[in-house]
């Protein structure tokens, strides 16, 4: 059974599609949750503070942690610092993806596994998956969805600028899902992908 890397740009509905794959029987994982765990490790915190400065720390001396909002503000406005932080995080993320996938397949070789990876192509992770899926919608639709969630316009555009254009992701992916409309239409597209993979 193929292992799928699911990607797309900020606000375009990757998580919705991941949930649909889960609903239809896939083992699904949001790699951002892996990142949240990695960012709690003392060694990772030290490396990021060394890269971005002590201004990204929060908490008291007994339990220091990263101010993720401050980290995001810095790295989405400074490409060099973003790349430096990615060099700290990405090897750990890749290790977790591999360990998670291989652990599941040892117990159930027929499992369909889907990982939501926002920076799939940017990080060069596509070679570690059997198939890739890019989720997209109109840019104004994505911006509108994010504004409703309370994300500031400045943050939205800073994050979108930091990502590979979704048009390029569409060209690189094995399968594409247009998430511009309702969930019913999106689910039909997920089902079509599963059918093409011989799963349904």
Image (cartoon, helix red, strand yellow):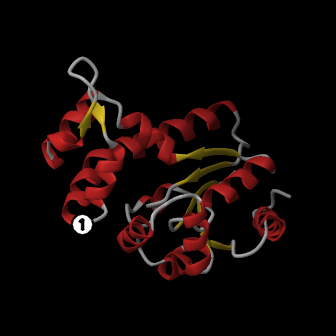
Binning the other alpha carbons within 10 Å of mark 1 as few (below 14), some (14 to 19) or many (20 upward) gives few
- Which element type, helix, strand or loop, lies under badge 1? helix
Q: Indicate whether 189 appears above or below 26.
A: below
Q: Nearer the viewer, residue 161 or 167?
A: 161
Residue picked out by circle 1: 79
Q: Is residue 146 left or right of residue 23?
A: left
Residue at point 24%, 30% (across, down): 43
The image quarter containing residue 27 is: top right
Q: Nearer the viewer, residue 16 or 24?
A: 16
Q: Is residue 90 left or right of residue 139?
A: left
On the image, the x and y values in percent for residue 31 come to 50, 47
- Quarter of the picture containing the C terminus is bottom right
Q: Indicate whether 65 appears above or below 138.
A: above
Q: Indicate whether 187 appears above or below 111.
A: below
The image quarter containing residue 129 is: bottom right
Q: Nearer the viewer, residue 115 or 108?
A: 115
Residue at point 54%, 72% (across, down): 143
Note whether residue 166 is visible.
yes
Residue at point 14%, 45% (across, down): 53
Note whether residue 90 is visible.
no
Q: What is the tally of numbered marks visible in this picture?
A: 1
On the image, the x and y values in percent for residue 169 come to 50, 75
Residue at point 46%, 40% (across, down): 34
Q: Is residue 129 left or right of residue 157?
A: right
Q: Nearer the viewer, residue 137 or 99?
A: 137
């Amino acid at each position: 059974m193929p292992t799928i890397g699911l990607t797309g740009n900020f606000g375009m509905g990757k998580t919705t599609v991941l949930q649909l794959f889960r609903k239809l029987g896939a083992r699904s994982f949001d790699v951002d949750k892996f990142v949240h765990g990695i960012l709690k490790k003392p060694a990772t915190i030290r490396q990021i503070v060394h890269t971005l400065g002590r201004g990204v720390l929060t908490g008291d001396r007994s339990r220091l942690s990263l101010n993720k909002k401050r980290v995001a503000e810095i790295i989405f406005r400074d490409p060099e610092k973003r790349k430096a932080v990615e060099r700290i995080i990405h090897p750990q993320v890749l290790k977790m993806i591999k360990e998670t996938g291989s652990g599941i397949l040892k117990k159930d070789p027929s499992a369909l596994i889907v990982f939501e990876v926002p920076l799939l192509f940017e990080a060069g992770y596509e070679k570690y998956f059997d198939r890739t899926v890019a989720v997209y919608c109109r840019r104004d639709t994505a911006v509108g969805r994010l504004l409703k969630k309370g994300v500031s316009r400045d943050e939205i555009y800073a994050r979108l600028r930091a990502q590979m254009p979704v048009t390029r992701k569409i060209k690189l992916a094995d399968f594409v899902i247009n998430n511009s409309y309702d969930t019913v239409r999106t689910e039909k597209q997920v089902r079509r992908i599963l059918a093409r993979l011989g799963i349904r």
